[in-house]
Amino acid sequence: MQVQTSGTAQVAIGNSNVQTQIQTQIVNNGISKAELQEMLKERFDTPNLQLELAKRYPGGYGLIGVANGTFIFQPKFKTFSCTADWEHTIIINDPSSDRIVLVLAHLVLQTPHSHQELEDVGISFPRTEHVPMPSKIVTNPLIWCEVLDLTNNIFVIGFK
C-alpha cells in the first residue's frame, strides 16, 4: 500500500527503514517503552476510562502508543484476539490534514467463529481526540479507531 500526503508528516515506523515521499521523523523521540507504558497505565488504564471504552467497543479494544518510534500495543480483548506486525506498521500524522492514517502491514483477527488475515490495512480516522470512526475495511467484528491523546500519539483500536 502506498500512502501519499502533501507536506511534512510524522511517521512512526517499527524498527525498519521505509522510504516515503514525506519527511520521516521519529515519533515521541526520547520516550522509553517503560515511560510510555507507565503513561498508558496512569492516564488510560483507569476504571472510568476502561468502562467507557468497554461500552463504546463491546468487542474489546487495544491502546496504541509510540515510544522512540516503536509501537506499544496493550490489548483489552475477552472473546477474540487481534495481532499486527507492529515492526512494519506506519502511522501518518500530517498536521496539515484532518485525518490520521494507520497502516498495518499484517493484521490477524481471531474470533471464536472466524479467522481473518489482512495485508496492508490502511485505517483513516479524524485527527481529533475522542471521535471514533469505523474502518471501511470489512471485518467481523468491525474495526474502529480514535485518538485519545493527539499530543502524545495515543490511539485506540476498538471492535464492535
Image (spheres, helix red, strand yellow):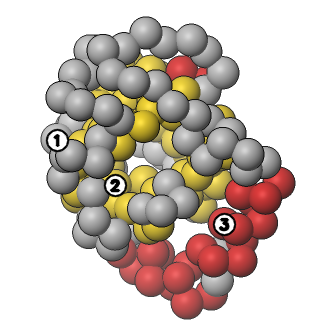
95 horizontally vs 104: left or right: left
45, 96: nearer the viewer: 96
62 horizontally vs 102: left or right: right
142 horizontally vs 59: left or right: left
Q: Quadrant of the N terminus?
A: top left
Tell me which corner region of the image, top left, top right, bottom left or bottom right, holds residue 85. Answer: top right
| Disc 2: which residue | 145
- Residue 154 percent coordinates (x, y): 51, 58
Q: Which type of secondary structure does the marked residue at label 2 adopt?
A: strand
| Disc 1: which residue | 136
Q: Quadrant of the C terminus?
A: bottom left
Tell me which corner region of the image, top left, top right, bottom left or bottom right, holds residue 6. Answer: top left
Q: CA distance from mark 3 to mark 1?
A: 27 Å
Q: Earlier in the sequence, mark 2 or mark 1?
A: 1
Q: Label 2 neighbourhood size at 10 Å, few (<14), some (14-19), many (20+)?
A: many
Q: Label 1 neighbourhood size at 10 Å, few (<14), some (14-19), many (20+)?
A: few
Residue most toward the right?
34
Residue 142 shows up from this direction: no
Of circles 3 and 1, which is in front? 3
